[in-house]
Amino acid sequence: RLGMSSIKNELEDKSFYYIYPEEYKNIKEYLHKNKQSLLLKLNAFASKLEKKLFDSGFSHSDFKLVTRVKRPYSIYLKMQRKGAVNIDEILDLLAIRILLKNPIDCYKVLGIIHLNFKPIVSRFKDYIALPKENGYKTIHTTIFDESSVYEVQIRTFDMHMGAEYGNSAHWKYKAGGVDHEDHHEGMRWLQNFKYHDSDLKNDPKEFYELAKNDLYREDIVVFSPHGDTYTLPVGAIALDFAYMVHSDLGDKATDAYINSKKALLNQELRSGDVVKIIKGDKIIPRFIWMDQLKTSKAKNHLRIQRRNRLKEIDTKSMINILATFFGRSVFEDVDLKDYKNFEEKLTDCGVETTLTEAMKSFENLVKLTEEIENKVFSLKEDAILEYQEMSLWTRGLRYLGFKTNVLNFLTPNRQWQCKELEHFSVCSSNALEIKQVLLNDCC
């Protein structure tokens, strides 16, 4: 997908050699021992296939055949997936690729192959009619010939360039001033691969997991009610499809219909399903569904949404604490439900410590309260001295033994008033909003 398949293949085989030396040795010995017979089979099938193409009107210049025996690590993966004990149980060790000039010839060749050799229907995939999300286009089929099995790939020369060298293969069209359709398809996938979240820079493990999900996955193809195709990973649910169509549809999805039947949003999709999503009016948080989602786009969107929601809750809690500590009347012109407006007001007053920073440590919280004390109150007609006295009174009230005390506090019209109280105890933790006291002799 990124034009690095040849490097990836070589690294896989070398890693396989060092991590599983015994398994690597067994496969290499089998391939070396049977090399002659495998190549004879492959060349005989290639000659037979070439003759069929000539008989059907194709010339030497119309196509190219490329034969190969599968790599050691690729064989090992097949053995693991099938639970095979030895290599003889793996049928399709041999593969052939047919390169042609245009897409219509790909289907002509497919017809010739299926008319002359017995196909394994479950292994047929048409990625030309239904390309993968990254723009990959090839017809895959597997056929029997004289008790041997061959994997056949059919594609054009342009498709081959894209498959081998990734999206970079299409840049040549831009460099030459040609606007090629495949370029746009490849670039769309590459743009989706860019995760728009700055936090990922500090979390390479999470970035790796998202990238791995995109780069190494088996795909299915599903349809919208209008016939648009969407490529999703195997195991994707209806909510994955909703987010693939649009983030807003995923956020507000209420119901799903799969093949015209009502289904749950977490129902697993199968290739060929027609999926319809019903959209509501409100965003419905579904953070607990994170583990059920398969697409990195949906996972990343919900992860960012969850983090922002937690930040909003923490910030509003911080604002309530500060408003209680300093008195809500101090922030009477601020909408305490709007934490962004609250931060803007603090910034306008010269407060440098943000609410986000204050939540990271107790030291930052103390720093923020000191800044509010020194900068916000200093703008209110030098009220800092009265505030400090009031603050001292608030903290030490329950430990004072005076029968009478004078309390300075700020009224809504920002005028200081004095109240003389006897035998008092505070009913409110917010000294700036005290309107009455309860007499309590024991205190």
Image (spheres, helix red, strand yellow):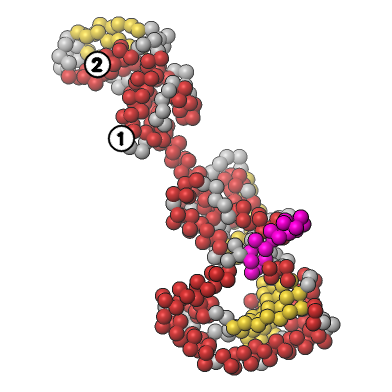
Main secondary structure along the magenta-highlighted residues: helix
* CA–CA distance in space, label 2 to label 1: 23 Å
User: Dividing the picture into quarters, in which one does residue 437 lie?
Assistant: top left
Q: 426 and 376: which one is in front?
A: 376
Residue 394 locus on image (x, y percent): 26, 18
Assign a secondary structure to mark 2: helix
The amino acid type of the residue labelled 2 equals Trp
Assign a secondary structure to mark 1: helix
Q: Can you see residue 100?
A: yes
Q: Is residue 173 magenta?
A: yes
Q: Can you see residue 260?
A: no
State which region is magenta. 162-181
- Look at 79% across and 70% down and name the residue there: 102
Determine which of the numbered discs, if any, sits on residue 184 in the image: none
Q: 17 and 246: which one is in front?
A: 17
Residue 415 locus on image (x, y percent): 38, 7
The amino acid type of the residue labelled 1 equals Phe
Question: Mark 2 or 1 closer to N-term?
Answer: 1
Residue bearing the label numbered 2:
393
- Look at 30% across and 11% down and name the residue there: 386
Query: Do the CB atoms of the residues marked 2 and 1 lie less than 8 Å apart?
Result: no
Residue bearing the label numbered 1:
362
Residue 361 locus on image (x, y percent): 33, 37
